[in-house]
Image (cartoon, rainbow, N blue to C red):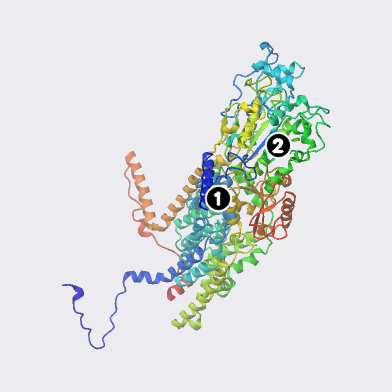
Amino acid sequence: MRALSRLTALLAAALLALVGAGYPVGASGPAIGDPASPVGHQATTPIQHFIFAMQGDRSFDNYFGTFPGADGIPAATCQEYVAGHPKKGCVKPFLLNPALPGAPVAGATVINRQWNNGKMDQFVSAFRAQGRDGSTAMGHYDAAQLPFYWNAAREYVLFDSFFSSSRSGPTHNRSYWVAARDQTVTISPTSADPGRPTIFDRLQTAGVSWKFYVQNYRSKETYRSASATDPASQPGRVPLLNIGRFIDDQELNSHIVDLGQYYADLSAGTLPSVAYIATSSATERTARSVVSGQNLMRNMTTQLMLSRYWSSSALLLSYDGPGGWFDHVAPPQVDADGYGLRVPALLLSPYAVKGQVNHTVLDYTSALTFIEKNWQLAPLTARDALAKSIAGGFDFTSPARPPAILHGTNGEPPPAVLRAPAAARAVFSAYGASVVLVVLVLLVAGLMPSAQLRWRMRRMRWRMRRQKHRRIGWRIRRRGAHSAARWRPSRLAPQPDDRLAESLR
Amino acid sequence: MNPAAAPALPRPAGPGPPVERPVPRSRRIFLPGLPFLAVVVLATFLRFWQLDRIGFNSDEAVYTGTAAALAGNEQLGAVFPIFRAHPVLFQMLLSFFVRGEVSDWSARALPAAIGVATVALTYLLAVRLYGRSVALIGASILAAMLYHVVVSRQVLLDGLMTLCATAVLYCIVRYSETESMRWLAAAGALMGATILAKETSVVLLGAIFAYFALTPTIRLRPRAVAFAVLAMGLVVAAYPLALVISGHVGSGQSYLLWQLFRRSNHPLGFYLSVVPAAVGYVVMLSALGGLIWLRAENGWRERLLMGWLIVPIAFFTIWPVKGYQYLLPTAPVLAVLAGRTIFRLSVTRRFARRGRLSRIVRLLTAGVVVVSVLLPTWITINAEPAGTVLAGTGGVPGGREAGIWLRDNVPDGSQVLTIGPSMANILQFYSHRGARSLSVSSNPQSRNPSYTPVLNPDLAVRSGEFQYLVWDTYTASRTKFFADRLDRLLTHYHGQQVYPRPETSGLDISHRNGPVVVYQVGPS
């Protein structure tokens, strides 16, 4: 019996030591480890729920090129119409407001030409080589059009060295998103299952819960019925629908659900440990869908903040390629395929460093690295094994920040609020002067007897006249000095009520 | 030698002439002041007793919010603009009470103190008009009057307006007695302050005009009038001046237009149905009956007081926009007139020669009248909060509690959608969260310029602009149409009751377990 209790004590001490060796968690912080996760694969950080949303193609400079503190558009930027011919003119970056032209739409050929072995000098001419006007590529947004994203960047973490994984286009990048490799080459309606693991295979094997939320999900639309390389199609946006086992295996397929389930899961308390989100009508590929995409992301973030999961979750938002939009930073070359050009990436979490612009070089596989380390999973490929994690955006030494709803309006305070101190000063000056005036008049009326007042005024007037006459050498007679004696207090005869009141006092 | 140890002197033996001991000076001053002191204590007690039992109503929230904004409170300043529908003299004074922490009690203490000051000033006015006995009865009636007590216990502009208006009356009485220019100038300056307290008091100028026009025995010298008008103009100039300096002239104009053309909010007989009960039927009967009964003695005093009653009552009865508290400046006048009648009851021929009997009758009559107004007042200020309340008669039950719950439990930046703007104001004040309402008209001519309409509530909720929907008994009982609309939004967007704790799981809009219910909604 004594041996048993000693063993229990030892086990408890060991458990405490293990927990203590992890991350210091404040009294209000969540307990480390998802109780729903199996032993050995519990979360090693307070992040027990990781959500990764992927939107359409946008470059970093296109969305945050003028964000304060970020590596944005250089001042002297001007992209030549025809590469190597500066005399033919160039296009400077311009604000996409109020004109919102259609997206440039760029495939692998255009993107590689724009990249030009890291020279980054053919963002306009790459389109002109195809007979298109590439001026649009130099357009960029700011806080006025992207209020939610800019508010999120001000409040949480904005990565300004987050690169797309490949220069081959959106569907290839989405492949890296889930598998840390480009496996779109193997996809065809007749091809066999590539068999290479994705992050969801790892999670499934480890028993860590996961879901893939798809906006307007149509379960029948897979690579067998639609183009897997078209970024607008469902298989193009949801890489799992290009892999046979995720279509045919009911267990695996049941994890791919409609986005509406995300809200239901938040409400019902069934949010999985890892969730991926792919949108359809709100991808932000087109100018029009920028608004709807931003609204959707705001809604998803807001609902996460209102749910029980906020204090133990993180949401990473990124874009599946530059889409032909200008970006001035040459990507580092890590292998034959990438990196691709920079894309926007925002990390929202109660543990995200407030208002940080993070300069760590990352790509989509950096999120996979974080998932693998957090849930103690093996890396998928050399890419994610070598990639730096997004963990630098977190500060686990501080307690979880309480949620603050981010608005879809510009974060600047309204003019009325800005003018409040001036208005208060105006009120205190004007009304204060009025109050002083009333008090003075009352003092004069109540405290100074009228005869005295009248006498003083006459004396003052007489003095002024005397001084004036002295100046011009006249002699005058003093007048009005005895006027006070002629003063009568009241000419009103006492009224019946006065007499009655006096008699009864 | 120690005087304490000295032997007592023997008393003089046998009867002698009574020795008149001189009354000490302190007692000569103190004793007659005792009844007045008792009246002030009564007024203070009734106005401060459980002052913050119920939370603010919409107007209180707005005025306190404005005062806090003036005091530099950034949170409330972001929600409550300084310039709204009224001048801000009261709000400026209140801003000194809400520096630092803003509490219901500290905000309501100022109007309550102003109410007590009005009782004291009414006493001074009545002393000037009819002597100390009438003044005591009149001040006692006002101290206990439901109408004045209820309005004084709220953060409203009408209390300060009534104090200033009573001071104007006092100055006019002094001018009528002395024809001294300084009293007319003081009346002018105070009239300016009355208008700065609340612009609707400008109708009292009509009462002043009527008084001087109908009382030729009081000479109105042009120079005195000029000084009075100048004083009033200089004081009132603060209102446009502050707007011009801070660049808010436009907002002032839009409020004026809205006030002039807004829809009628009460029927023509509103005041007839509400005010007599609030003032007290006995008081009304005494005041008005006395004017008829003692008509032979009516003079300039009664003409002045009658004008002070008739002009605002006539104006606000015809004016489409009516508020419970708008006629408060008539309360001191009614109290003084009632005091006059009650006093005269005891000095009729039957009692006049019997001094002691007369005094007893006077005391009894005054006591009965004061108790008749005191009882409903006491019952009202101690009554359990009802779900539906008339605007201006007190706080809105449940609003403060719901607002504090929102402040403590929902994330910063959350947006709340209510049925009507009154509850939105209350929730904004207590929760520091943004709130808008369904019933605000999209037509700029039909809405208060302070409010922003929700043009498409369905889209707004669907796109996540609002995270919480709030239903309240107070507004739902006034506008069923918008209450039903809120219910439809709750049904469409998966409303989940989060405050108070729901009795059953799932949405149940047929049974609500509180005067204010908060629901969380999400996109479908």
Residue B17 place in picture, x, y as percent? 27, 84
Quick check: B313 above or below A277?
Answer: below
Chain containing mark 2: A
Residue B179 place in picture, x, y as percent? 46, 60
Helix, strand or loop for disc 2: strand
Helix, strand or loop for disc 1: helix
> Image check: A114 left or right of B362?
right
| Residue in the picture at 41% in, 58% down | A446
> Image check: A196 left or right of A492?
right
> Image check: A343 left or right of B366?
right
| Residue in the picture at 77% in, 25% down | A186
Residue B421 place in picture, x, y as percent? 65, 52
| Count of numbered marks | 2
Q: What amino acid is found at the position of numbered circle 2 in the picture?
A: Ile
- Which image quarter: residue A313? top right
Q: What amino acid is found at the position of numbered circle 1 in the picture?
A: Gly
Q: Residue furthest left?
A: B1
Residue A323 place in picture, x, y as percent? 71, 25
Report how far apart the C-alphas of labels 1 and 2 lie in the structure.
43 Å
Q: Nearer the viewer, mark 1 or mark 2?
A: 2
Which residue is disc 2 drawn over?
A277
- Asked whether the residues under marks 1 and 2 belong to the same chain, the reply is no
**Residue A234 visible within the image:** no
**Residue A409 visible within the image:** yes
Res B65 label: 1
Considering the image in quadrants, where does the C terminus of chain B appear?
A: top right
